[in-house]
Image (cartoon, helix red, strand yellow):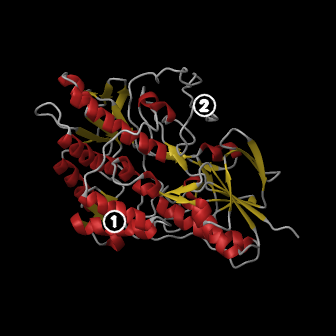
Amino acid sequence: MSRPRIVIVGAGFAGYRTAQILSRKAKGRAEIVLLNPTDYFLYLPLLPQVAAGILEPRRVTVSLAETLPQVRLVLGEAGRIDLDARQVHYTGPEGENGTLPYDRLVLAAGSVNKLLPIPGVAEHAHGFRGLPEALYLRDHVTRQVELAAATDDPERCSSRCTFVVVGAGYTGTEVAAHGQLFTDAHVAKQPLRTGMRPRWILLDIADRVLPELDERLSRTADSVLRERGVDVRMGTSVKEATSDGVLLTDGEFVGTRTLVWCVGVRPDPLVQSLELPMERGRLLVDPHLQVPGRPEVFACGDAAAVPDLENPGSYTPMTAQHAWRQGKVCAHNIAASFGDGERQAYRHKDMGFVVDLGGAKAAANPLGVHLSGVAAGAVTRGYHLAAMPGNRVRVAADWLLDAVLPRQAVQLGLVTSWSVPLDTASPEVARVPGGPKDEQPSDRAGTDVTPPPDQPEPGPDVAPGPVRRTDRPDEGDA
């Protein structure tokens, strides 16, 4: 008798955790297949530190093959799911097509950048959902500082050294905090014109930084940002973006070459193609993470609208904290569907939140205890080391080296602006000329996004921007 096949779509926090727990419970009695565009799990909470030059890129990636030895990895992106035939159709990294039949299906496709109908944003901003975007931002910021230091034009110097971050959630706050430290250290070695320093602007329509968190954490983060020199502007956002800067909602035009987009995330478009009941773009499931009417289909993480049993009538937020825990429950319930144990309803209890503000500064409230400064920094880094499923020693070593050695601010030129568009269904994969294109109506409204051969990408460089995170098992705004 053949073994049942369980196909998991996505290796983010929910998908990775589901595969990890299932592989332990199945013990070879079921075939577990993980479909993912990359061969690694990305620990997204530390991505701002990659962009700021603290951590090397591979430190925040965990090999799927090494850590999930009982799971079969298939590289590719799910394109169409035939629920009646129980098949997942996918496209491989080199454009090849494939099909995966399943007995149980787990939809853990995660989320992508949240888009707003603001003129110019899609063309001049970038997201922060994947490693390519972090590498691009690191190069771009370094390049802008170097070009600013070399120019005699004060207006051009100012625009190149002005960095606008939209969204004061976890990601935006951390990017602005780390970014100010990174650029200040850079200009200390390569000074700008007399009296000038890099300027980071943090915008949000909310009335305070980190609006989802306790007000004390918000005040701590706001204080650290302002002391560091970040221009924090609440109740303000972008009205229009151009190649020369951004027009703000208060009427001010800010000259900049860098627009960092951190306004939030939306569920992966894959789940919308299933024509099943949805809740604000998320696939509706019951408390056991099963799709009503499709008991063989499970969904968890950002792609799923999971009833919040602690707050009846609402759904759990799109955070990594929930995604990680839902993955564990999903694995148990899949095993139970084969007769191994009893089903569990998903319930949660917040364990607290941490926000890394760079240097020795952080804001945290583990188990409800409010911390700031060095104590919060120690708790924050300790939490990340405990939560990571691998690379702990390497991450700790990079932190130690960063504390005693200056950062290497150099451009590697590995990722271009064209390779990391804001509107993409696959932020974890950089676009390459001649490679498979996004199957999304985001290719600039049908225009040809392929750069002309032997010519530079059009338009000035504008940096990538982060998003609200769904990827940290430590916070409520992954």
Depth check, front residue: 301 or 71: 71
Q: Position of residue 410 (x, y in %)?
A: 33, 41
Q: Amino acid at mark 1?
A: Thr
- x and y percentages locating residue 232 in the rendered image: 24, 43
Name the mark nearer the viewer: 2 or 1: 1
Residue 349, placed above or below residue 56: below
**Residue lying furthest left:** 195
Residue 85 to residue 352: above or below: above
Q: Is residue 229 visible?
A: yes
Residue extending furthest toward the right? 1
Q: Which residue is painted at 73% across and 78% down in the image? A: 340
Label 2 sits on residue: 441
Q: Amino acid at mark 2?
A: Pro
Q: Is residue 217 left or right of residue 125?
A: left
- Does residue 150 appear to the left or right of 286 in the view shown? left
Say how many tags the image has: 2
Residue 380 shows which numbered tag?
A: 1
Q: Nearer the viewer, residue 207 or 426?
A: 426
